[in-house]
């Protein structure tokens, strides 16, 4: 039912414009000036400072250029963040409904995986009673998404506040936070909380063409951040110098440009909702604007919806089965103004 290759980052289907010419020029200028060597393992200083401001604007507290790491995309962020706090063969808890990249990252170190039950009524988030389950409480690491990569639903803050205590580390994927309908919905993560250990991961400046370059971030407590940098260096994982300079340029105007995209997405959502209403299919409640998740849609109805929505959908969709949900489809919303 899906029409994309799931080995790539699914969020790349939400690219809404080509990379700005100034960003391309910045990348070219950096290469021309001799920036062809490996840069600092955690990323060029200027980009780390910009990334810290970006993460701070999406709820991450006490993040600085010293405890943020630039990665080659969110998949690398998932891998490094979860591996450095989980010993080989260690226990990791993961909601059954989540991005397939989570399981791939965890499989590379032979982790003991505990998959917690999810509640469809909550948007396929981890069920409330699972937070106190032996499987979650007994795990070294809990890997979560907030908002959900499948439904766009978000957790209540008091539930996530139970994670990351008693020697456990919570790795929270906040990559979809920029797409939240309201900035007030962003999860607050304090990297210097003496009672909890929490790491934030995600993409950098999405939606405006930088995604193919593959840039993500890890924001972690200082002691953990230092270990992640060491692991990145030992594994010789390098992040493109040219891409980093392009991203630095994107960061200077991303906020204004992104607000235009957000407004267009909201308009498209209205069109899609009207088309779905006429078809009589169920739409999962979502807090993000970049996609919709439809429950119980027949294969024969997919093309009908795409056609009825016109330019309001990109035409890209994913079967819920790759996230762990049958009988559901995720459709990417378009920011086109046509």
Image (cartoon, helix red, strand yellow):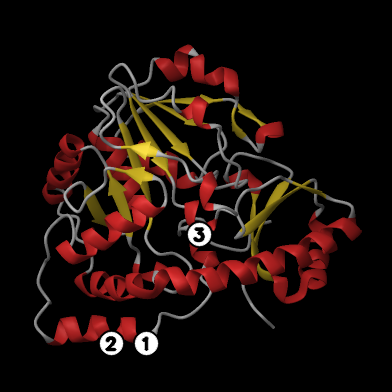
Asked which quadrant contains residue 102, the reply is top left
Q: Nearer the viewer, mark 2 or mark 3?
A: 2
In the rendering, at what x and y percent does residue 310 appear?
A: 76, 75
**Marks 1/2: CA–CA distance:** 6 Å
Q: Nearer the viewer, mark 1 or mark 3?
A: 1
Q: Are marks 1 and 2 in contact (CB under 8 Å)?
A: yes
Determine if residue 334 is in view.
no
Q: Earlier in the sequence, mark 1 or mark 3?
A: 3
Picture quarter with the N terminus: bottom right
Q: Which residue is mark 1?
A: 21
Picture quarter with the C terminus: bottom right
Frontmost residue, 96 versus 165: 165
- Indicate the secondary structure of the residue bearing disc 1: helix
In the rendering, at what x and y percent does residue 73 appear?
A: 34, 58
**Marks 1/3: CA–CA distance:** 22 Å
Write the residue at 12% across / 76% down: 36
Q: Which residue is mark 3?
A: 11
Write the residue at 74% across / 44% down: 327
- Indicate the secondary structure of the residue bearing disc 2: helix
Bin the neighbour count of mark 2 within 10 Å (Cα to Cα): few under 14, some 14-19, many 20 and up: some
**Marks 2/3: CA–CA distance:** 25 Å
Q: Is residue 137 positioned above or below 196 on the image?
A: above
In the rendering, at what x and y percent does residue 89 appear?
A: 29, 24
Frontmost residue, 337 versus 184: 184
Q: Earlier in the sequence, mark 2 or mark 3?
A: 3
Determine if residue 200 is in view.
yes
Left or right: 57, with 97 as reference point: left
Q: Which residue is mark 2?
A: 25
């Amino acid at each position: 039912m899906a029409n994309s290759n799931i080995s790539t980052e699914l969020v790349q289907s939400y690219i809404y414009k080509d990379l700005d010419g100034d960003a391309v020029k910045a990348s070219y200028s950096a290469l021309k000036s001799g920036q062809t060597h490996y840069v600092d393992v955690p990323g060029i200083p200027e980009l780390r400072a910009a990334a810290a401001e970006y993460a701070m604007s999406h709820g991450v507290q006490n993040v600085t250029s010293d405890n943020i790491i630039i990665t080659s995309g969110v998949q690398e962020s998932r891998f490094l963040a979860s591996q450095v706090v989980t010993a080989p063969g260690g226990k990791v808890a993961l909601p059954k409904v989540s991005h397939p990249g989570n399981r791939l990252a965890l499989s590379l170190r032979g982790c003991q995986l505990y998959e917690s039950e999810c509640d469809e009524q909550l948007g396929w988030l981890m069920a409330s009673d699972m937070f106190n389950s032996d499987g979650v409480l007994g795990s070294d690491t809990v890997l979560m998404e907030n908002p959900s990569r499948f439904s766009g639903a978000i957790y209540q803050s008091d539930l996530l506040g139970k994670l990351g205590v008693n020697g456990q580390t919570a790795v929270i994927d906040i990559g979809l936070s920029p797409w939240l309908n309201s900035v007030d919905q962003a999860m607050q993560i304090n990297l210097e909380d003496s009672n909890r250990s929490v790491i934030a991961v995600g993409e950098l400046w999405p939606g405006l063409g930088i995604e193919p370059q593959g840039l993500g971030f890890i924001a972690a407590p200082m002691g953990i951040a230092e270990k992640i940098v060491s692991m990145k260096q030992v594994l010789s994982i390098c992040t493109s110098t040219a891409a980093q300079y392009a991203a630095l340029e994107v960061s200077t105007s991303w906020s204004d440009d992104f607000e235009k995209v957000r407004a267009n997405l909201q308009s498209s959502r209205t069109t899609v909702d009207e088309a779905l209403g006429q078809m009589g299919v169920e739409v999962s409640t979502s807090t993000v604007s970049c996609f919709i998740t439809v429950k119980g849609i027949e294969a024969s109805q997919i093309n009908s919806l795409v056609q009825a929505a016109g330019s309001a959908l990109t035409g890209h969709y994913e079967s819920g089965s790759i996230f762990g949900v049958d009988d559901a489809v995720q459709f990417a919303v378009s920011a086109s103004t046509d």
